[in-house]
Amino acid sequence: MRSERGLASRRGVIGAVAGAAAALPAGIARAAGNPQNQPPHLPEWGRSLGPGVIEETYGTRSRHETAVRRYVPWLTPDRVSSVSFTPLAEMHGIITPSGLHFERHHGGVPDIDPADYRLMIHGMVERPLIFTLEDLKRMPQVSRIHFIECPANGGMEWRGAQMSGVQFTHGMLSCSEWTGVPLKLLLAQAGLRPGASWLLAEGGDASHMTRSVPLAKALDDAIIAYGQNGEAVRPQQGYPVRLVLPGYEGNMWVKWLRRIELGDRPWFSRWETRTYTDLMPDGLSRQFTFVNEVNSVITYPCPEKPLQGRPGFVEISGLAWSGAGRITRVDVSVDGGDNWRTAELQDPVLPKALTRFRIPWEWREGQSAFLQSRAMDETGRVQPSITALRAARGTESIYHKNSIHTWLVERDGTVVNVQIDA
């Protein structure tokens, strides 16, 4: 392994975000707390009664837990067609709390009365049908854990390091337990006509966003979901019903689903012809690139969670995912990709779900490091370097950026976003 000085001189750091972390002494002071609440003293919260069991009819988290979704004002002209980002650095395990699940809207969030909700299925079917919410809930249900990722996740990083934290480089990503009816059961009731090979899913919001979906996907693992993490789907996530397409890019998971039309070809809606295409170096565009590629990111340490305190043992942790199936391996490097070690995958390791990985590391005082993770899935796909991805895809697209991500750990423990020209 070459020295840190050699690492810095032989690799070109393309970009870094300045001012990404707070000063170390301030962080240590904040972590110290109130000495009167620490041993051997009896803390103040143990000297009086707290609220009773009926004080909160809907539970809330501790007032000391302050992680929130965040919005970038300059990203879009208006909030009704914008995005909020999941605070990945604050997440434990693989499930994203519903209240911290990222949002992406095209016409704001509709207020839908579940009593008035209807789902239509028509087109190339024998029996056009209309389902109420109660009709759907009477049918055999499934519950499965799957991630959802916007295809533009990380899209601002194609040409260089731009954002100052994992919440903004990868935060258009969440993972929930989805409960609902397999779409294939509804299609069986409607009866497919010969030649049907595509379906059009339309949302019930003001934009009436539509997406073309291969029938093969609908008959495989698609879910008409009314439940999320044990309760009703949140309004921002499509209440009362959304489409769940495990492994497919998030814009196809149509929210507030109102109709499904069967046909023998894709519809090429305005959403599909004007957006969600991948511009290639030769000027052509790829369309219908449905599957989110194998990807990973280290969530500790990261710009939001620098290495503060005494040097010593650190457990590097992160998330890996693939729209093609299970994650089978994640390797971690602390020297910018010169050397790799295989991390432990935390159970459960599920198909098309987030997978938590962990690996121990000894951080020495005054040591700088380039942290990277590289994921592999059960199909043999391997996460590429940013250089390899640019060679194949150019820099004009904003979609499906799944390259290896680099955090630079500075000598004082602060962490910044950089890209290594490898």
Image: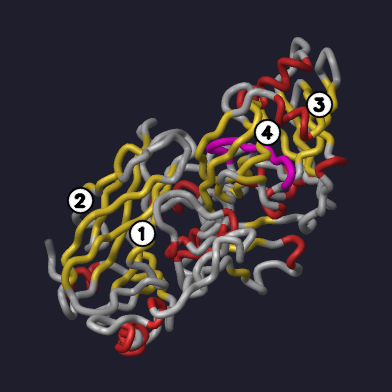
Question: On screen, 308 above or below 326?
Answer: below
Name the residue tied to disc 3: 121
Gap between marks 3 and 1 measured at Cα: 42 Å
Name the residue beneath numbered marker 4. Answer: 224
Badge 2 is on which residue? 341
Query: Under tag 4, what secondary structure?
Result: strand
**Mark whose residue sits in front, 4 or 3:** 4
What is the distance, in whole Å, between disc 4 and disc 3 at their CAs? 12 Å
How far apart are the alpha carbons under marks 2 and 1? 14 Å
- Where is residue 189 shown, x and y percent of the image? 75, 16
Residue 247 in magenta stretch: yes
On screen, 79 above or below 285?
A: below
Left or right placement of residue 261 versus residue 418 in this view: right
Which mark's residue is nearer the viewer, 4 or 2?
A: 4
Between the C-alphas of marks 2 and 3, the distance is 50 Å
Q: As shown in the figure, which amino acid type bears the numbered disc 1?
A: Ile
* Residue 373, numbered label: none
Residues in magenta?
Answer: 239-248
Give the Cα separation between the discs numbered 1 and 4: 32 Å
* Residue nearest the observer in this picture, 2 or 20: 20
Nearer-the-camera pick, 326 or 120: 120
- The answer to whether residue 396 shows anywhere in this view is no
Name the residue: 51% across, 58% down: 154
Q: Decide if residue 236 is in sight here.
A: yes
Q: What is the number of the mark on residue 298?
A: 1
What residue sits 53% from the left and 51% below the top? 174
Give the CA distance from mark 4 to mark 2.
40 Å
Q: Is residue 40 left or right of residue 218?
A: left
**Numbered disc 1: secondary structure:** strand
Which comes before the other along the chain, label 2 or label 3?
3
